[in-house]
Amino acid sequence: MNKSLAKTVALSFALTLGSEVSAAQSSPEHMNWATSWYASPQPDWGSDFVLPTNVPSFIENQTLSETVRLSAGGKRLRLVFSNRYGRERVVVGAVQLASLDLSSANIKQSVTFGGQRNAIMAPGAQLTSDPIDVTVKPLTQLSIKSYFPQRTAITSFHWGEQQTVEVASGDWTSRSGFRPDSNIKGRLFLSGVLVERPVPARTVVTLGDSITDGNGSTPNEDRRWPDFLAKRLASQGIAVANAGISGARLLRDGMGVNALARIEQDVLSQPGVTDVIVLLGINDIGWPGSPFAPAERQMTLADLVFGYSQLIASAHARGLRITAGTLPPFEGALEGTPFAGHYSPAKEQLRQEVNHWIRNEANFDSVVDFDSLLRDPSNLKRLQPVYDSGDHLHPGDAGYQAMANAIDITVLARPLARSAKPAQGER
């Protein structure tokens, strides 16, 4: 380890311990920071799981190049890296930020951590950069190159086909003409981008599964429903942080930890958060008895009501508004694939019961009826063909845009009343 890197170890540990917002909250202006882009970390899963990760077991002496599109703009930025599920420390050798948006100022800047270009993330920790003095507009695309000089195990990542990480040998953070020699689907270590707002910050967090993560949308084109929602909210300066995870469930772990376990870091600790939109439960219903979880017992309505009520209680305890989406139809889901068995008439009955509870009995602050929006009028158990990506489970681009358009943004734009409604069981 060189002297510069050794000198930063103690400071790096201090910076990385705690939540993503710890460095932002040390400033007297911390209330003006908002999460403008986010990718929820996931732990790796075993080779015995039906779906492979297709992520390398390690990287070494390599630069990762990632593209992110911000939601809200701001006058300064911070980058957040995560080693949440890592079992070893991660050495970050250097990071460079650049803008891909020709309408924005020409950005090309080295990123520092405690004044140093390199830093260390402890196992389970996050790393928040120093403020970067650049002004960005809403919906700006950024290119972020991160160099990892040492052999680094990949046990914490964000999985998915919707975004490609380009990988090149050596350190390209201060060189031009980046030449990748491989790519990875998903995200590695980069977890968030914070923006500093000139007015009190506001962030909407979307907590969900692969439908929120955008499975079925056009890769690398930012066409998930939270992306379309970000476009609608951009003119109002409201940020959107996507906390969707493929395979996510409300109550049980799978391709990620359960929502009750991750709500603290993925939602409640996000800078500027005022609202959370929840779309979860279809995997809790569909996985048991399928190739994803063949030995699990079926969920009950009471199980799911308990989980949703806990999310409501957690949000209201922090003074946040919480909106729920009804579960879209999924008859025929994954038919003709190795994952068939996701749907059954009994599972459909439970979905209907859950949606009835969400619409009529739950104590969410508002409801978005994605079920009514997306279902086929000639078969209410199926997605409309125009909205179906083709697997009868995930919407495509048109479906995701329709979902974003169905959200009442006047609710999200209202000032947050801290005297939030009591959750079920709190009265």
Image (tube, rainbow, N blue to C red):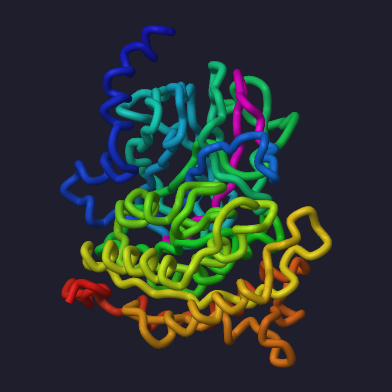
Q: Residue at x 61, y 35 (%)?
A: 46
Q: Residue at x 63, y 81 (%)?
A: 374
Q: Residue furthest bottom?
A: 378
Q: Position of residue 311 (x, y in %)?
A: 34, 64
Query: Magenta segment: does it hold 278?
Result: no
- Residue toward you, 296 or 153: 296
- Residue toward you, 321 or 413: 321
Please, is residue 56 above or below residue 315 in the view? above
- Name the image quarter holding residue 121: top left
Count numbered badges in the picture: 0
Q: Residue at x 68, y 68 (%)?
A: 343
Relative to 397, is 297 on the left or the right?
A: left
- Name the image quarter holding residue 345: bottom right
Quarter of the image where the C terminus is located: bottom left
- Residue toward you, 410 or 334: 334
Q: Position of residue 146 (x, y in %)?
A: 53, 31
Query: Magenta segment: does it hold 63?
Result: yes
Q: Position of residue 223 (x, y in %)?
A: 63, 65
Quarter of the image where the N terminus is located: top left
Please, is residue 190 above or below residue 179 in the view? below
Relative to 18, is 177 on the left or the right?
A: right
Residue 184 makes an appearance in the image: no
Q: Which residues are magenta?
A: 55-72
Please, is residue 189 above or below residue 393 in the view? above
Q: Residue furthest right?
A: 336
Residue 353 makes an appearance in the image: yes
- Name the image quarter holding residue 296: bottom right
Q: Residue at x 59, y 85 (%)?
A: 373
